[in-house]
Amino acid sequence: MGAFRWFCLFVSIWLMCGTAHAERRIALVIGNSAYKSVPKLSNPANDAALVGGMFKKAGFDWIDIRTDLNASEMRKALRDFGGRVRDAEVAVIYYAGHGMELDGTNYLIPTDAALETDSDVLDEAVALDRALFAVEPAKQLRLIILDACRDNPFAKSMKRTVAARAIGRGLAKVEPTSPNTMIAFAAKAGSTASDGDSKNSPFASALVERLPTPGLDLRKAFGFVRDDVLKNTGYQQEPYVYGSLGGDDVSLVPAKPVAAAGLQASPDDAIRRNYELALQLGTRDGWTAFLSRYADGFYADLAKGQLNKIAAEEARAAAVEKARQAEDEKARLVADRAKKTEQDKAAAAKAAEDARIAAEKTKQVEETKAAAAEQRRREIEAAVAKALADKQAADQKVAALPSPAPSPEPAQSTQELAKSVQSELRRVGCLGDAESGEWSAKSQRSLTLFNKYAGTKLNAALASTDALDTIKARSGRVCPLVCDHGFKADGDACVKIACRTGYRVNDDNECEKNLEKKAIATRESVSKRDAERQRNELTPAKPEVRSTSQIFCSNAGCRPVAPGCRLIERGNSTAGRTVEVCN
């Protein structure tokens, strides 16, 4: 009920004000011809003067005619006009000149526009929405007439910043949201208008012919304008009107009063006026108040339709808001995932960089250790080479001097030196037996083997301090490990070769199957075998000497022991000799 009381009060005030003063009509007329960046248009300035004169003859209360306006002048003219519209019932804007459509939005082009790129349109042109905003306060009729559908010359030279951006070939279709608003195009959306052959365009000429007709409804007047333009352009140009009006006739020039003494006012006039008032309000409360008073009839059905329209708009707005929230949430999730991905990439990159730095440090440490070890090796080799060179130089000097009479050395000193040399020879793998202190033929052969594998030229006939120092300088095995027949190398030791049953070790130290041959005994072979056995029993056994080096040396030189052979010593340990015995 509160809304109904407010509505009734508003209706009463509106009715009183309506009878207090006559309706106020104002118009703004703009014609742009003298463009600076494209060829001049001949008709817009003439059309503006023609249409402005029509409004004057029609008895408009205020008319502003402007020509060749730049961007700032156009915006100022629309702003000033919007301030005057607040006190008017009818507001009309007429524009003649260049216009264009960009991404579904229509623009009016001032005379100073250059429009080198599509993004310049937002700054250098004036949006049609700015004109709609200016006429919106009018109480009864809002009318915009656009003679701006000419072929746009800027589109040919304009650079696109986005390849997919749409630039129309005329103006785009417009659906006004305010009630009692009409927008008249000189040509249908997406098509171009003609300037014609005279000083005025066919559209402007038809407007001044049809619109000032007293009492002629605007919808019918623009229908006549359409027919005139189609006829005058050979059906090439079709004007078009967008928007809607109420059920009553709306004329630009009121009809002349006609005497009607016997006529009575229609009972629907009050309902219609209240409907128009609710339509101007355009709110759910206004339509609810109207329906609470007028529940049935034509205008009640229209009011219900308006309520349905408001409900549909509210549903659409709610759906749009929900979709926007969903898009925002989706964008947030995408941003969070992108941020997480970037953080993971940064962490992986940092870990890889840390691993690389650690590897570089480890490499530097190892290289430093290797360089230090190599330096120590070089220093040791240099020291050994220097010692050998100094010794050889000293030996050469001693050899050059007269040889003094040999003085007998203490036996104990000679044995200790021999024992030390034997110990070092055994350490480097050139002597298989324990050190005895006696420099025997086996010791000489061991030192000869050392000379061979170490590349030295030591005197093998005796144990000397030179030999001892040179052998001590070697840190590992020098002579290879050579095992006797029936033995094989296992690390630094010789182990006996074990063959399975039925196999034996052949001359090549390999296991082979035994060849079973039945021996044929004869009297002669038995006699020889018995004689040999008696001779062996009478002869004392000689100890068998094994050498791990298996090198046989004689006056002719040293050579490896032949396969299947071994070395034994004959005679005593001081005056004996080593012989090679083969099976």
Image (cartoon, grey):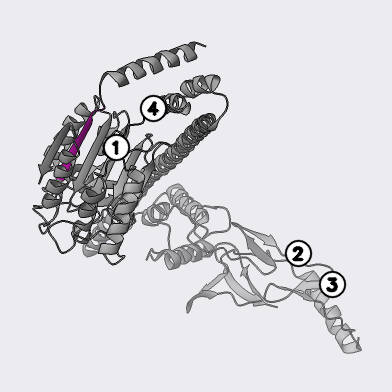
- Between marks 1 and 4 in the image, the one whose residue lies nearer the viewer: 1
Answer above or below: position of 348 versus 4: below
Q: Which residue is mark 3?
A: 502
The CA distance from mark 1 to mark 4 is 24 Å
Q: Are marks 4 and 2 in contact (CB under 8 Å)?
A: no
Q: Are marks 3 and 4 in contact (CB under 8 Å)?
A: no
* Disc 1 secondary structure class: loop
Residue at x 78% of width, y 72% of height? 504
On the rendered structure, is 104 left or right of 195?
A: right
Residue 452 placement (x, y as % from top left): 44, 68
Residue 542 placement (x, y as % from top left): 69, 66
On the rendered structure, is 408 left or right of 56?
A: right
Residue 498 placement (x, y as % from top left): 76, 64
The CA distance from mark 3 to mark 4 is 125 Å
- Quadrant for residue 251, please give it: top left
Q: Which residue is mark 2?
A: 498
Q: Which residue is mark 1?
A: 255
Secondary structure mostly seen in magenta is strand
Magenta residues span 23-30
**Which of 372 and 286 lies nearest the eye of the viewer?**
286
What's the amino acid at mark 4? Gln
Q: Residue furthest front?
A: 262
CA neighbours of label 3 inside 10 A, class few (<14), some (14 to 19), many (20+): few
Residue at x 25% of width, y 48% of height? 146
